[in-house]
Image (cartoon, rainbow, N blue to C red):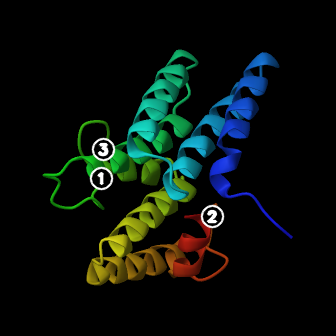
Amino acid sequence: IQTDPVQATFPQLEVAYRRALEYGDLEIYCSAMNREIATRFFFGDSLQSIETSARSHIQAMDLVHEKLYNFSTKLFLQATLNLINPYCQDPSTLTGEVTNQDALLALAERMNFSAFMMQVSRLRIYIAYLFRQLDLASELVENVLAKFTGSEKKNSLFLPTGPVVPATFHIG
């Protein structure tokens, strides 16, 4: 069975969010825009294309007052900007022009939005691994495991159902 590369699906992702907007489903619209950026990031679109699309999507989300998908899209934009910037010392730190990872994590913690906290961690693990920052990737995995599997988080809305590292690389 021959399959097309994931990049061949990029135009279909655009169709998905445009169709959701046509039908007035703003949640699916924003979710699809965010998913498009994540897919482009993890599956090899050019960094300039990701930056352009992410900035456009963030503006669209601002117009409809969407916050959660906006935060997520900003994380991918910041990661992209880090990769573009030749002077970036640590591309796994998602703080810069468009986001502050510590502020976003604190907000997610206050909102008990553990899925977002997991997304930040997975994105950082992925980037650390790509740049062979294996000690940092290991530390991040240990932090995730301690935070999300500790007894104080048994009532959390989201717990990893499988190993953190395979889940990270399955997503990315």
SS type, badge 3: helix
Q: Which mark is residue 35?
A: none
> Residue 160 placed where, x, y %?
61, 73
> Residue 20 placed where, x, y %?
77, 26
Determine the residue positioned at 30% across, 44% down: 81
> How many C-alpha atoms fall within 10 Å of the one at disc 2: few (<14), some, or many (≥20)?
some
- What is the quadrant of the C terminus in the image? bottom right
The residue that label 3 is drawn on is 81
Determine the residue positioned at 50% across, 63% down: 118
> Residue 121 placed where, x, y %?
43, 65
Is residue 154 rendered to the left or right of residue 52? right
The residue that label 2 is drawn on is 158
Is residue 22 rendered to the left or right of residue 71? right
- Image depth: mark 3 or mark 2 in front: 3
Give the residue type that dot 2 points to: Phe
Is residue 150 rendered to the left or right of residue 47? right
Q: Tell whether label 1 touches label 3 (CB within 8 Å).
A: yes
Pick whichever of labels 2 and 1 is earlier in the sequence: 1
Give the residue type that dot 1 points to: Leu
Query: Viewer-proximal residue, 139 or 92?
Result: 92
Determine the residue positioned at 51% across, 32% down: 67
SS type, badge 2: loop
Determine the residue positioned at 30% across, 52% down: 83
The alpha-carbon separation of the residues under discs 2 and 1 comes to 29 Å
Q: Which mark is residue 83?
A: 1
